[in-house]
Amino acid sequence: MSISSSLSQSQLKYFRSLQQKKYRTQHKAFIVEGEKMVKEISRDEKTYLEVIRILAVKDFFEENTDILTKHDCLIASSKDIEKISSQSSPGRVVMEVKIPDYLLDQSELGEELNIYFESIRDPGNLGTIIRTADWFGFNKIICSPDSVDVYNPKVIQSTMGSIARVKVFYRESKEIIEMTSKGTLFQNLGTVLGGENIYELKFPDKGMIFFGNESNGLSTNIKESCQNQIGIPGAKTEPGPESLNLATSVGIVLSELNRQKLLKMKI
């Protein structure tokens, strides 16, 4: 473990720069904050992530000595942590993590049910979606290239550690549709207002569930590629909201999908 009473100006500049996408891309690294997530990722044997180093105040390392033997560590002052942090109330530790270079397996994609997100703009939504996907057993999601960066600090924070177990890919919808159309018995399902009731739908074993932008929903080209358009029925009361929050919709759809899977296992 390296020991320092404070970080150098060049070190501080580097770590602060990782709050911006262009520098994350340049250095192929991002920051994880919060003791719970740092501990979870550092101790998770099934994580997809590679820890570069951990920066924390001395007390944190004294309370978590096992971390010292697993990773490169650097003692920093509380003031330095505060300068690096994007949080309004910084904690005692930050983690530098390598941005993974995931490979999207086309053959695997065509043989299972996957989820795709078009033009997600809200960091909190994407983070919550990753956490929800993790809960329901999805180890990957696919987003359109114009979606918010998964390594945005707000996204990472909202995942509550699930970023370590869910791979996030960025691909154009056209590419994904071409890849998955080669599979047999494969169905593209588009989520739309007024679509077929998900509670009356038998989800396919192989397919892609498309979720649209928070404000505009799915684009026409994706809708036209879907064999079926599905929706979540409401209580039909007036007046009421025009739509559900995207992350909430994802949770409801994946919950119903999981319920159907559990029923199949009991048969």
Image: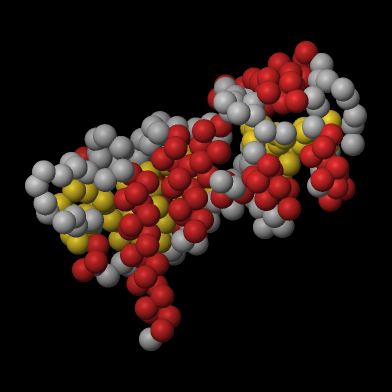
Residue 97 visible here:
yes
Q: From the viewer's perspective, tell me whether residue 138 is left or right of residue 62.
A: left
Location of the C terminus by quadrant is bottom left
Q: From the viewer's perspective, tell me whether residue 239 is left or right of residue 205.
A: left
- The furthest residue to the bottom: 267
Residue 46 horizontal/vertical position (percent) = 67, 57
Query: Residue 203 or 53: which is nearer the viewer?
Result: 53
- The furthest residue to the top: 9
Q: Quadrant of residue 241?
A: top left
Location of the N terminus by quadrant is top right
Q: Quadrant of residue 143?
A: top left
Which residue is at 72% across, 34% downward? 92
Up the image or down, 173 lies above or below 7; here it is below
Q: Quadrant of residue 27?
A: top right
Residue 14 visible here:
no
Which residue is at 30% across, 37% downward? 214
Residue 45 horizontal/vertical position (percent) = 72, 57
Which residue is at 45% across, 45% downward? 128
Residue 86 horizontal/vertical position (percent) = 59, 26
Up the image or down, 173 lies above or below 92; here it is below
Q: From the viewer's perspective, tell me whether residue 172 is left or right of residue 92.
A: left
Up the image or down, 43 lies above or below 152; here it is below
- The furthest residue to the left: 238
Residue 191 horizontal/vertical position (percent) = 26, 51
